[in-house]
């Protein structure tokens, strides 16, 4: 069982560490995305090139890699009961799926190819949750969109969704999912520490479709 879960973790990490934002910007002729805006490889910084379609593709691919890792693990790992958590039965394929998806997010945040300097894991987290508990993902997406269109702060939208996810999952999901979602939400919040400081100071950049 341990070897299976280690393979899930490694596979998820390697899939998540593919820096799609960086690769797409190079292919589109924008150069190194880390040299503009927030110096991040995520979709919000890709949007600062002014190419909204490239930013959308980055979101989809970043979400896809963590979601795919979770899906593949769920399908390939045996559906064997391994114990209980919070009074609910946990199967090996569910645990493997959660580990693979979570490690995919970690890979996005800390990719080995970029000296462990990656994105903030928002899109990857959404893809992971979408593949494992899609109703929670839709709620999180609704919160993000509402906050984004109301206040136009990508970071504030992500932080609000991150806070909501563990609360909602507590009522709608088995406890093992809530545990993983809480850890991922905390990671998203920690990765936004600089954004939180700028929000408090009123210095955070708003979402813009204009090239910078």
Image (tube, grey):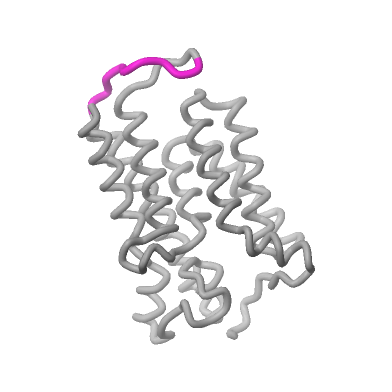
Image quadrant where one finds the N terminus: top left
Residue ID at (57%, 78%): 37
> Foreground residue, 30 or 183?
183
Provide residue 116's location: percent of width, then percent of height.
39, 62
Up-down relation of residue 177 to residue 39 (above or below): above
Spot the residue most to the top.
87
Say if the magenta span includes residue 111: no
Rendering coords of residue 185 (x, y %): 56, 44
Q: Nearer the viewer, residue 84 or 127?
A: 84
Q: Is residue 127 above or below residue 80?
A: below
Q: Residue at coordinates 50% horizontally, 17% vertically from top-left?
A: 86
x and y percentages locating residue 31 in the rendered image? 41, 85
Left or right: residue 77 compared with residue 55:
left
- Percent x, y for residue 51? 51, 78
Residue at 27% across / 34% down in the picture? 5
Give the residues in magenta.
78-86
In the rendered structure, the answer to whether residue 172 lies left or right of residue 143 reads left
Q: Which quadrant does the C terminus fall into?
A: bottom right
Q: Is residue 122 left or right of residue 157?
A: left
The quadrant where residue 109 appears: bottom left
Q: Is residue 85 magenta?
A: yes
């Amino acid at each position: 069982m341990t070897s299976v879960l280690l393979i899930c973790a490694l596979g998820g990490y390697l899939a998540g560490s593919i820096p799609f934002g960086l690769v797409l910007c190079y292919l589109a002729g924008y150069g190194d995305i880390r040299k503009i805006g927030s110096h991040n490889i995520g979709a919000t910084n890709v949007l600062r090139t002014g190419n909204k379609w490239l930013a959308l593709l980055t979101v989809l691919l970043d979400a896809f890699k963590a979601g795919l890792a979770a899906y593949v693990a769920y399908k390939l790992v045996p559906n064997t009961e391994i114990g209980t958590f919070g009074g609910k039965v946990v199967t090996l394929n569910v645990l493997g799926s959660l580990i693979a998806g979570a490690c995919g997010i970690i890979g996005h945040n800390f990719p080995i190819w970029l000296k462990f300097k990656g994105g903030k894991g928002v899109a990857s987290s959404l893809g992971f949750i979408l593949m494992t508990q899609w109703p929670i993902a839709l709620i999180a997406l609704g919160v993000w969109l509402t906050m984004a269109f109301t206040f136009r702060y990508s970071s504030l939208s992500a932080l609000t969704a991150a806070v909501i996810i563990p609360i909602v999952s507590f009522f709608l999901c088995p406890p093992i999912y809530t545990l993983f979602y809480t850890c991922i939400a905390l990671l998203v919040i920690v990765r936004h520490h600089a954004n939180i400081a700028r929000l408090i100071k009123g210095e955070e950049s708003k979402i813009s479709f204009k090239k910078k």
